[in-house]
Image: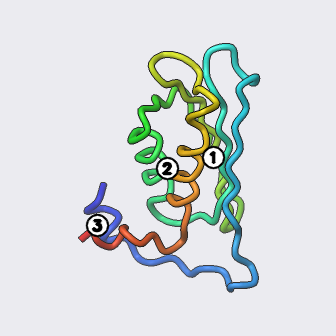
């Protein structure tokens, strides 16, 4: 995956005025067995990989993922579990921070990871 992303041409980004701020929301009632996480952010190569990596690094399993892209806007919906159960509310804040960081258009560590 890293090799593919490194060799992929850089996309033309929207102007600064058209930038899409990341939005992360959780819904514990949408499913009987999983927590729904909805992420809307500026699309870029590797975004889905970075989001999945953030979820995994926080001990989450992705049960279902739905992805959509509208122009430069990514809309990703994950149904996740942690240790076979819905995500506990006290774990959401740290996960939300990690997901927002994963959405950053110019990820600080991305160049190092892909090199």
Q: Which mark is residue 114?
A: 3
Q: Residue at x 68, y 85 (%)?
A: 15
Residue lying at the far front in this picture: please name it: 90
Q: Earlier in the sequence, mark 1 or mark 3?
A: 1
Q: Earlier in the sequence, mark 1 or mark 2?
A: 2
Q: Residue at x 43, y 51 (%)?
A: 49
Q: Which mark is residue 51?
A: 2
Q: Which mark is residue 113?
A: none
Which element is circle 2 on?
helix
User: Which residue is more in the foreground, 91 or 68?
Assistant: 91
Q: Which residue is mark 1?
A: 76
Residue contact at pointers 1 and 2, CB within 8 angstroms: yes
Image coordinates for residue 16, horizontal then vertical, percent: 68, 85
| Residue 100 against residue 54 in the figure, above or below | below
Q: Label 1 vs label 2: CA separation? A: 9 Å
Image coordinates for residue 109, horizontal then vertical, percent: 36, 68
Image coordinates for residue 62, horizontal then vertical, percent: 49, 31
Mark whose residue sits in front, 1 or 2: 2
| Residue 77 against residue 62 in the figure, above or below | below
Image coordinates for residue 57, horizontal then vertical, percent: 39, 42
Q: State left or right for residue 112 relative to residue 56.
A: left
Q: Label 3 vs label 2: CA separation? A: 15 Å
């Amino acid at each position: 995956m890293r090799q593919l992303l490194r060799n992929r041409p850089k996309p033309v980004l929207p102007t600064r005025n058209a930038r899409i701020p990341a939005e992360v929301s959780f819904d514990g009632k949408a499913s009987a067995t999983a927590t729904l996480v909805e992420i809307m952010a500026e699309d870029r190569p590797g975004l889905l990989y970075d989001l999945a990596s953030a979820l995994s690094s926080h001990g989450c399993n992705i049960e279902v993922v739905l992805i959509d892209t509208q122009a430069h806007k990514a809309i990703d919906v994950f149904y996740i579990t942690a240790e076979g159960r819905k995500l506990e509310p006290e774990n959401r804040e740290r996960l939300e921070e990690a997901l927002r960081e994963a959405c950053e258009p110019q990820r600080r560590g991305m160049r190092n990871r892909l090199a």
